[in-house]
Amino acid sequence: MFSNSLNRSLCGENAPALSDDELVAMSVRELNQHLRGLTKEDVVRLKQRRRTLKNRGYAASCRIKRVTQKEELERQKTELQLEVDKLARENASMRLELDALRAKYEALQCFARTVTRGPLSPGKVATTSVITIVNQAIYKAFAKLSI
């Protein structure tokens, strides 16, 4: 930061001293009015000082923006990871259900082939045998998944 004596020497003895905040905040028109009557060397130094201070401000705001963006991206990543995990669980559940349905279908196909060959007693098919066949097929399907 500029010390008052250095600032006063840059602005001339009679000119009011400018703080860093004032130097950065003033418009170009105000700065040019303030610089009237100063030596070319002093004008260059003050303008360079203003540019340095403004660049510091821009760099600080860029750092803040970068950190904010990083935090937002990390939040989105966490959110998406939770969604992926949820979908993976749903997928696994649906696969189990599909395997059970396949097993039922195969059991019913097997039973249908048995029925078309002809029942053991004419005119009557035992419903308990259908349930047993389907339950055995489901049990086998879940046993395969457990292995």
Image: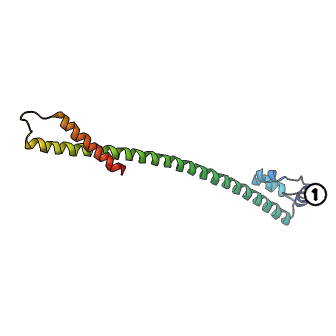
Q: Is residue 101 left or right of residue 62?
A: left
Relative image position of residue 88 (x, y in whole percent): 42, 48
**Residue 71: horizontal and vertical position, in percent?**
60, 50
Query: Residue 13's quadrant in the figure?
Result: bottom right
In percent of width and height, residue 31 lies at: 80, 55
Determine whether, in the image, residue 3 is placed left or right of residue 101: right
Relative to 12, does residue 71 appear above or below in the rendering? above
Q: Quadrant of residue 104?
A: top left
Who's the residue at 91% across and 60% down the image? 9
Colour treatment of the image: rainbow
- Judging by the rendered image, the residue that carries numbered circle 1 is 13
Of residues 144 and 26, which is closer to you in this image? 144
Q: Is residue 29 left or right of residue 128?
A: right
Residue at 38 percent of width and 47 percent of height: 92
Q: Nearer the viewer, residue 2 or 68?
A: 68
> Where is the N terminus found, in terms of image quarters?
bottom right
Which sits in the foreground, 106 or 46? 106
Q: Tell me which amino acid carries mark 1.
A: Glu
Farthest residue to the front: give it. 120
Q: Position of residue 130 (x, y in %)?
A: 19, 38
Left/right of residue 38 with respect to residue 53 in the rendered view: right
Q: Identify the residue at horizontal 14%, vertical 42% (top origin).
A: 112
Taking the view exactly as shown, the residue that stands out farthest to the right is 13
Residue pictured at 45% horizontal, 49% vertical: 84
Callout 1 secondary element: loop
- Looking at the image, residue 103 lies above or below residue 17: above
Mark 1, Cα crowd under 10 Å, few <14 / some 14-19 / many 20+, is few
Q: Quadrant of residue 117?
A: top left
Name of the residue lying farthest toward the left: 122
